[in-house]
Image (cartoon, helix red, strand yellow):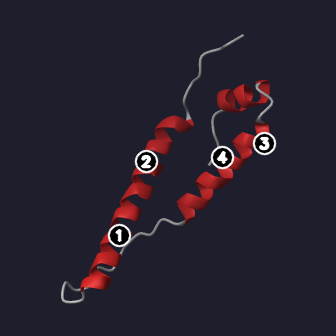
Amino acid sequence: MSFSPAVHELFDRWNHGDLLANLEAANQALLERRKDAVVIAQQSEPKKHTASNCLVLQQALLHRAASRDDEFRYLRLPSYS
């Protein structure tokens, strides 16, 4: 994932290009944890069923974050000169 040139320019102006690089790397690591499908355990196995429910929630949050990421990727920032 890469942010817009305006975001890169802003972080460079703040002398925090390394922070932006770390943010992009962390975001990519989270995106790589996403799965297309989750197997749900039977309710007759409560521990496994609870664990699979947690995995579904985790995946839902990762997918939601990725869809919000698309909105911010091309965000135009105001100029603070």
Q: Which percent across, then down, holds residue 15?
A: 81, 30
Q: CA distance from mark 4 to mark 3?
A: 9 Å
Q: CA distance from mark 4 to mark 2?
A: 17 Å
Q: Amino acid at mark 3?
A: Asp
Q: CA distance from mark 1 to mark 2?
A: 20 Å
**Is the residue marked by circle 3 packed among few (<14), some (14-19), or many (20+) residues within 10 Å?**
few
| Rendered-image quadrant of the C terminus | top right
Q: Which residue is mark 2?
A: 67
Q: CA distance from mark 2 to mark 3?
A: 25 Å
Q: SS for tag 3?
A: helix
Q: Please give left or right for residue 40 compared with residue 63 in the image.
A: left
Q: Measuring 52% from the left and 66% from the top, which residue is drawn there? A: 33
Q: Amino acid at mark 1?
A: Cys
Q: SS for tag 2?
A: helix
Q: Which residue is mark 1?
A: 54
Q: Which residue is mark 4?
A: 23
On screen, 7 above or below 53?
above
Badge nearest the viewer, 1 or 2: 1
Q: Measuring 40% from the left and 63% from the top, which residue is drawn there? A: 58
Q: Which percent across, then down, holds residue 60?
A: 36, 59
Q: Measuring 77% from the left and 37% from the top, which residue is drawn there? A: 17
Q: SS for tag 4?
A: helix
**Is the residue marked by circle 2 packed among few (<14), some (14-19), or many (20+) residues within 10 Å?**
few
Q: Please give left or right for residue 79 compared with residue 62 in the image.
A: right
Q: Which residue is mark 3?
A: 18
Q: Earlier in the sequence, mark 1 or mark 4?
A: 4
Q: What is the quadrant of residue 38 in the picture?
A: bottom left
User: What is the residue that sits farthest to the front in this orientation?
Assistant: 47
